[in-house]
Amino acid sequence: MRLPVARPDEVDIALLGIPFDGGTTNRTGARHGPREIRNQSSLVRPFHHTSLTSPYDLAGIADCGDAPVNPVDPADSIERITGFYHEVAAAGAIPLTAGGDHLITLPILRGLLRGAPRALIHFDAHSDTYDEFFGNRYNHGTPFRRAVEEGLLDPKRMVQIGLRGAISDAANFDFAKAEGIRMIFIEELMARGVADVMAEAREIAGAAETYVSFDIDIIDPAFAPGTGTPEIGGITTFQAQALVRGLAGVDIVGADVVEVSPPLDPSGITALTGATMMFELLCVMAQATARRGG
Amino acid sequence: MRLPVARPDEVDIALLGIPFDGGTTNRTGARHGPREIRNQSSLVRPFHHTSLTSPYDLAGIADCGDAPVNPVDPADSIERITGFYHEVAAAGAIPLTAGGDHLITLPILRGLLRGAPRALIHFDAHSDTYDEFFGNRYNHGTPFRRAVEEGLLDPKRMVQIGLRGAISDAANFDFAKAEGIRMIFIEELMARGVADVMAEAREIAGAAETYVSFDIDIIDPAFAPGTGTPEIGGITTFQAQALVRGLAGVDIVGADVVEVSPPLDPSGITALTGATMMFELLCVMAQATARRGG
Amino acid sequence: MRLPVARPDEVDIALLGIPFDGGTTNRTGARHGPREIRNQSSLVRPFHHTSLTSPYDLAGIADCGDAPVNPVDPADSIERITGFYHEVAAAGAIPLTAGGDHLITLPILRGLLRGAPRALIHFDAHSDTYDEFFGNRYNHGTPFRRAVEEGLLDPKRMVQIGLRGAISDAANFDFAKAEGIRMIFIEELMARGVADVMAEAREIAGAAETYVSFDIDIIDPAFAPGTGTPEIGGITTFQAQALVRGLAGVDIVGADVVEVSPPLDPSGITALTGATMMFELLCVMAQATARRGG
Amino acid sequence: MRLPVARPDEVDIALLGIPFDGGTTNRTGARHGPREIRNQSSLVRPFHHTSLTSPYDLAGIADCGDAPVNPVDPADSIERITGFYHEVAAAGAIPLTAGGDHLITLPILRGLLRGAPRALIHFDAHSDTYDEFFGNRYNHGTPFRRAVEEGLLDPKRMVQIGLRGAISDAANFDFAKAEGIRMIFIEELMARGVADVMAEAREIAGAAETYVSFDIDIIDPAFAPGTGTPEIGGITTFQAQALVRGLAGVDIVGADVVEVSPPLDPSGITALTGATMMFELLCVMAQATARRGG
Amino acid sequence: MRLPVARPDEVDIALLGIPFDGGTTNRTGARHGPREIRNQSSLVRPFHHTSLTSPYDLAGIADCGDAPVNPVDPADSIERITGFYHEVAAAGAIPLTAGGDHLITLPILRGLLRGAPRALIHFDAHSDTYDEFFGNRYNHGTPFRRAVEEGLLDPKRMVQIGLRGAISDAANFDFAKAEGIRMIFIEELMARGVADVMAEAREIAGAAETYVSFDIDIIDPAFAPGTGTPEIGGITTFQAQALVRGLAGVDIVGADVVEVSPPLDPSGITALTGATMMFELLCVMAQATARRGG
Amino acid sequence: MRLPVARPDEVDIALLGIPFDGGTTNRTGARHGPREIRNQSSLVRPFHHTSLTSPYDLAGIADCGDAPVNPVDPADSIERITGFYHEVAAAGAIPLTAGGDHLITLPILRGLLRGAPRALIHFDAHSDTYDEFFGNRYNHGTPFRRAVEEGLLDPKRMVQIGLRGAISDAANFDFAKAEGIRMIFIEELMARGVADVMAEAREIAGAAETYVSFDIDIIDPAFAPGTGTPEIGGITTFQAQALVRGLAGVDIVGADVVEVSPPLDPSGITALTGATMMFELLCVMAQATARRGG
């Protein structure tokens, strides 16, 4: 978005990248997401066409660069990312991150300053609450289970929106059900509509500090083909924008857009979609900052 | 779908491929459809996310390989395919086929065991009831006219859903109208909605043995660009899935997904869509088998 | 559309191309639009599937070739195009043009025979009423401001449909507001529906001679990725077709389809969409011609 | 090449297209070759950079359109093509053809005026002298065997240059060996060099009327990926141009460039290569025409 | 290559795949190499065009499937691969492997039966004898250093052919130089020619048991764009085939083709090249097996 | 190349970009060249593999950003670029530029400090000494004619290497011949070899201050498809690297790499080639700087 570059202690909201896909079980490529999202963001201008306001007028915002990763050692990467986000949080900046695969949300949550378990509004085709894969407990299908187990998230204040796609075992959703995580499948979303579903989501999050995680694969692969685990039957980008605008009023303390995979995106529209969704998130985050007196 | 390989006499439902596009009048490539659908099907897992059941628990299902074809002789191919499906039917298996261009439905129908003319629920942008092309009566625009003429299908129990696109002659639909085939154009489908249209389709098929033919080009080319005769203004994959789920209760004796053309599908989403639609069909077919005591 | 080639004085409606993108501020390529639209139009047949009539039966129609352009001198190109369209208009033909970037609409309007300022129905993601870019007043973001200033269009009879996307300055829409141009943003279009919006558009145009400009980027980039300034959150091609059919009854004196950029369109669906929208426009233009006794 | 369009009786050399790939055993798409070669030929200008002469100054040359084909009936297509070339030959024009798959060379040879069996200089990765495939004797692997059997070609005056690639049976070359067809494999071509090999080729053809067939797959797939049966380890386009220039002095009575398959050619360089090789052939053919007093 | 599937104890030479790219420091995708190489190998036929013999007549050969890997845990993958190759070796089969990134060669070498350190003929743009990357000692830039350190390879009997490309540190080649590994840079290869260089390579390997590792990136990216670390200025596929044929007489006890990355290979020619190089290796390995009385 | 960013007065050699293609007569896209070359340059490391030295140890080098351009006004762009390069030259930095189309070389030469007309070593498929196009005298086919006319270059010290491709008029080379510019066509280059040709080039330049212009289209489109005017029959990247290394000893006062067009480069190898050629030029320029005591 042609933003200035700055240190986290100079801003209210820090745009960050995590070029990591070591948690990907099938089709990799999300490590190149931050670069292409930055590239395509040159097409995104500062003023929102509905509000005619710019987030840059509401809050201090800059591109604070990429988190350190180790491309051949996922465990080491998780540690490095956690440390990096701890520094960002300590500097007082709220992170808006371009991934990377979905495993990155775990070290981001670990890096935030400790407090009460947080709420989560989670847009995704997949629940990502599996226990393990090949005996491995840290991959892009497990971050939210780990985060609940570690007390980083409050399952009663978690909502997952847009779930769909065949699953490997009928028991895959048992953890989420047992913990009381609210799962809204695509059929329910389409039947009720975006406004109604987001009203419920805001109610679930309530006044709690809330993290927002946006997996690009909630969007249909026609609109976002460049992703590792595409599921047909998804939402349009128009609906995606409406979902994010429905976050208005939520106390957002961090957000991410993950699973944009440029090698699978020949026409570049997935990265463009990722960049635009980053902008939509930035608008609601800047409003939240302004409300806090940021 | 990472399925075992088996002989037709070992299964209730046989997944088959027909790598044939000798009936294609313009852009070929559907001969590579079965291979790419198999490739992409590795992303499709066994349990349906709405029912949380697996078709593999309801019926014996396996990949029984490809029908023999002669890539440089359409007439010879039709004979070989007919013979192959006759064997499949004689072995007691219900075929679910990945095409291939739409001409393949004719030899499949010929190969099924003789009985009363069957019902047809046909999803497609095109009626495929032309009489001839360049003097040729056997191509991907004519299979359903031939099937009616040969007594394989009962036109009073035929419904075509999703028709659209400019046509070469105002008389193109005269045969279908004269025979009483019910044509539901895209405008009607969009206005009435999937549930209402499928209620009518189930009524048309009634209790008859029903064949289901799914041409990928009913779906909009944004979602399925890899096809020989794309027509803009189509349905989404979400609607396509709903259409197929609306087949619940129909006595399906065979089904196909045709016109997936990998050379025209650079991002692979058409083959993924084809594979997922195969899975949705498999779910309703397995239910039908279970009902029959299969 | 496999049309005959003719001179403008031999036809009622002249299909024309303008291979020009010298007004493009970012991603070029629209200069190759006319060629690819012609290529893909070989898939478009003559009879509309809803009316079962052919525009070629209602009016004299032919491909009258490309306007002259100078690929390395935008100002010279504008003059050449103006002259060319003046000849077309003098010959009595109504032009339907395949662009080219959106700047081409200005010399087309200049070339039409002088009369009262005309009405405009404008489908686009962008208002294209900027004043300047880099100090330059003639580029693809400014044609409609220039046309109003030059008295070619009556701002009170102008409607812009489908606007969206972040903008560079909150004042970008001030000109349009001040002049009374009716702007219908995507959110309003989606909420009210196509039929309602087009009823208003027809009312705005009234009985005035009306020019129709269709920028392909009103359509979502999932359906039309091959364009210079894509904006996510757009309409489907089904909606686009409905919008154009909603022009029935309008006194159309010229139309264009612009901003199709083949180098950004690997699967060719944007050019196919452009060709099909040309056909839809041709149908309503031929009806208008028939009404006039053409 | 931005050529005028004319009838065969108006020209010395007729450029023709055959949009046919019904003889293709594996990956189709060559039916779109003529269109894309024409498209890319807009980049080819009239004067050869080494001779600084233009073939259009030496002979009457025009684009005479496409031969009729039946896309769903190979046998019918062969008859139609034969008839078309018979008319071209009767009109006194020498054909230079853009294919299409390699089977088209058979009906072209049948269509030429009868006389003594002709010589053949054949550039190709494959010998195309198989007997049958799936029991079928007319496909893109058999044209030269059929042509020898039918007395259209004199095997003693045939040379095949650039052969390579694993074969399905050790006996595949037995026919060519038995008939005395000279086969120059890629290893010999690379070791001896183009000049030496072409000297031999000219000697084999001698003063006989000679047909030249250029299969694009003699060129390495790095330079020409868009072809149905690519074989790695081929020649460069620089070598290909030198091969064709080595035809100077041969009495060429017809030529073709075959197996350009646009759907497999995402960057368009294969069609560009095809168009440029057409131009190189045109230069030597125009020289031959000028020598004859054409 | 349309091969039968078998267990390692049923064959002399086992074709295997390792779908692993967890050792890749930059652009991933090689995990999909085995699948696409198998896909493209359907174009490769059994008889070599120069020898007119088939490797399948010289040795028992079959596809023995893929090694187990853990896509999100490189260290675990290395252990699993080592165990798998130990079983293959114990069953008496010689492995020919399709990678995967270059780290896979280390567990393959570990899995082979222990004996004297082996010779290595290594075709590659990169030496892959780095010590570490980001503190990590096991990635696709280090396998040959580890293999020397572990006594799996005899550095005096190692030759690396085709090296090129800018390096991160002038000391990168110090290990190879100190150990006496013979490095033949691209400039030397081009100046001396393939035959001369391979004569030296055979001399270096001598009568020792020799492993052959072929990194696809020795080939120029024009011929093989689908690879993670492309370096321009490479060899042609014709030269690559000649290099492998120059292995005739070497006592090969295992070989691999690595770093084919399908997501970076839109036209598929890299996978085709990989499949063809597998076939060329198979031919020389079958000869070696036949010499041993296999 | 992951370089630091700096002002021209802080460096010996300034890497610059000119995102301009307003001089392109046919296929645009070179305006995106600088961005993609920077992207791909992340794969290029600092030490040359033959010299094992790094240019960054020989001279002060940094990325000094892009020249200002006006995308919709070529004439204005030329003025802005000239001014920008005048400042670079005044700051004492030697420019190495990533284009942009070839017209950019004219304002670069104008911007350099005045002195004696300079020598030029020019690698290109095209002579670019046309007089005009459509009456326009400033486009990517004319820069070297204008530069000679303006006294910026000494035609007796100009050499053009790699020329080829059909031309629009036999007189196209008359200017170059009349002025004594040495033209080395591709046939001569291939026959004599790189070393011999570069010896002559060094002799022509002599001790004069020399500008080096490298048009990516000297390289064959198999290696560099992403360019506006591709000509088959070009050189390999290996030869291209050798050509540039042959500049050792020349007194280079500026250089550019032009006509890299990312929209025409689906696999990215053209941008990679551009980045690598930039690095090779940087190496010889840094040597020249070191010789001067830089």
Image (spheres, coloured by chain):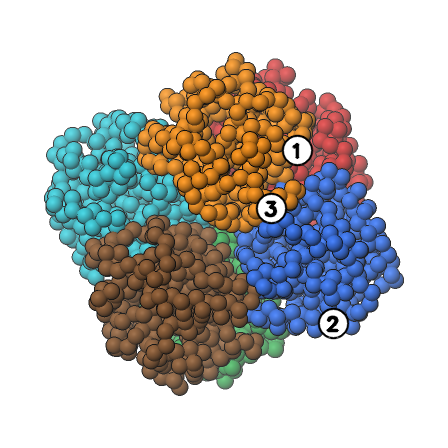
Chain colours: A green, B cyan, C brown, D orange, E red, F blue
Q: Amino acid at mark 2?
A: His
The dot on residue A51 is: none
Q: Position of residue F152 (x, y in %)?
A: 76, 64
> Image point 21% across, 31% down: which residue?
B110
Describe the element under mark 2 as helix, strand or loop. Answer: helix
> Image point 46% across, 47% down: which residue?
D4
> Image point 81% across, 40% down: which residue?
E178
What chain letter is assigned to the residue under label 1? E
Nearest the camera: A158 or E106?
Answer: E106
- Kindly indicate whether the residues beneath marks 1 and 3 are on one polypeptide chain: no
Q: Nearer the viewer, mark 1 or mark 3?
A: 3
Nearest the camera: E191 or F243?
Answer: F243
The dot on residue E239 is: 1
Describe the element under mark 1 as helix, strand or loop. Answer: helix
Q: Is residue C30 left or right of residue C189?
A: right
Q: Residue furthest bottom?
A: C178
What chain letter is assigned to the residue under label 3? D
Q: Is residue B202 left or right of residue E153?
A: left
What chain letter is assigned to the residue under label 2? F
> Image point 66% across, 42% down: which residue?
D50
Q: Position of residue F162 (x, y in %)?
A: 69, 47
Q: Position of residue D138 (x, y in %)?
A: 39, 25
Which residue lies under the disc numbered 3?
Answer: D47
- Kindly indicate whether the residues beneath marks 2 and 3 are on one polypeptide chain: no
Which residue lies under the disc numbered 2?
Answer: F86
Q: Residue furthest front?
A: D293
- Kindly indicate whether the residues beneath marks 2 and 1 are on one polypeptide chain: no
Report how far apart the C-alphas of labels 1 and 3 lie in the structure.
35 Å
